[in-house]
Amino acid sequence: MNDKTIVTHNGNFHADDVFSVAALKCIFPTFNLIRTRDDEIISQADIVLDVGGEYDPETGRFDHHQRGGAGAREDGIPYSSFGLIWKQYGLEICQGNEALAKSVDAGLISTIDAIDCGHVEGVSTGISLSHTISMFNPTWQEEGDFDACFNEAVEFASRVLARFIASANGGLSAKAIVAKAIENAEDPRIIVLEKYTPWKRTVHALSEAALFVVYPSQTGQWRIQTVPAELGSFEDRKSLPKAWAGLNGAALQEVTGIEDAMFCHNGLFIAGSESFASTMKMAALAVEA
């Protein structure tokens, strides 16, 4: 099988063309990458992205700079070349897992697309992943090789993409586990997990009653953690008892009456003890406080 020829523009690069090439590396083990704006070379390529002024997935054309762009998502975020590549190949990259492909698009790709297209509504400020990629370009003070810098950025983006897919897959698996724990909770205010599982998004989506989540720590003890009032918020639906704030060991054991209580954070959002039974006692005290 002959290697594919993939073309993108030369010169200064951005996150959309870098991540597009990183995504295509998941599909094509080897390919010939050419960075150019030469129309003749572009016309002969198998896949063209972020250059060429055409979007036609059947002929391997994935540009979004033409008049009218290349469409937008239901939420209004327009597609850049990365989004167009993902739209074509994302399901295959995610091994047929449609939910995973959609999750990666929502969490990673759409943000890169939005920044590239100047669609800033809902995009957080500060140093973004797109900005990070742009810093791989040589600065005006450097005599850098743009193609070599591009290749370096692609290697970085490939690692980010792989880890984001793994993280998103873990999040989807966690959702089912946490949903089952919510369903099985003896007291809907206390959700118990048999092993630590990312829980905040699912608890917020499925349970308005949950106040605390109990789970084992990686070191073998148990933890109780408060449910935030909103995702990303430092406020809780219900804090741990004020009398516990900042106490450790014997001091916390005396206040709680729990012989193996270990600690309570001064912020009253997490505490722990040696055993599951004791942590459940802490949860019962916290609910009634």
Image (cartoon, helix red, strand yellow):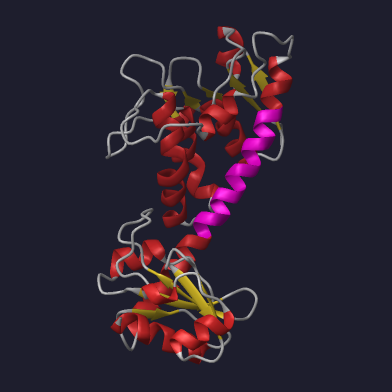
Query: At 74% across and 21% down in the image, what residue appears?
Result: 148
The residue lying at 59 percent from left, 7 percent from top is: 38
Taking the image as shown, residue 72 lies to the left or right of residue 6, namely left
Asked whether 21 or 126 is in front, the reply is 126
**Residue extent of the magenta highlight:** 152-169
Q: Is residue 99 visible?
A: yes
How many numbered marks are there? 0
Q: Quadrant of residue 78?
A: top left
Figure quadrant of the C terminus: bottom left
Whole-percent x, y for residue 114 in the image: 39, 30
Residue 137, above or below 266: above
Position above or below: 278 against 195: below
Is 166 covered by the magenta stretch?
A: yes
- In terms of depth relative to the viewer, which is nearer, 125 or 238? 238
- Is 65 rendered above or below residue 193? above
Residue 101 on the magenta segment: no
Which quadrant is the N terminus positioned in? top right
User: Can I make out residue 95 in this image?
Assistant: no
Q: Residue furthest left?
A: 208
Q: Between 20 and 127, which is closer to the camera in this rendering?
A: 127
- Residue 27 rendering spot, x and y as whole percentages: 61, 42
**Rendered location of residue 238, percent (x, y):** 31, 70
Residue 192 falls in which quadrant of the image? Answer: bottom left
Magenta stretch, main secondary structure, is: helix
Please give the name of the residue rendered at 58% of the width and 44% of the height, measured from the top-left corner.
161
Q: Locate residue 8, reporting x and y percent.
A: 58, 20
Q: Nearer the viewer, residue 139 or 47?
A: 139
Name the residue at 52% across, 24% down: 49
Which quadrant of the figure has residue 42?
top right
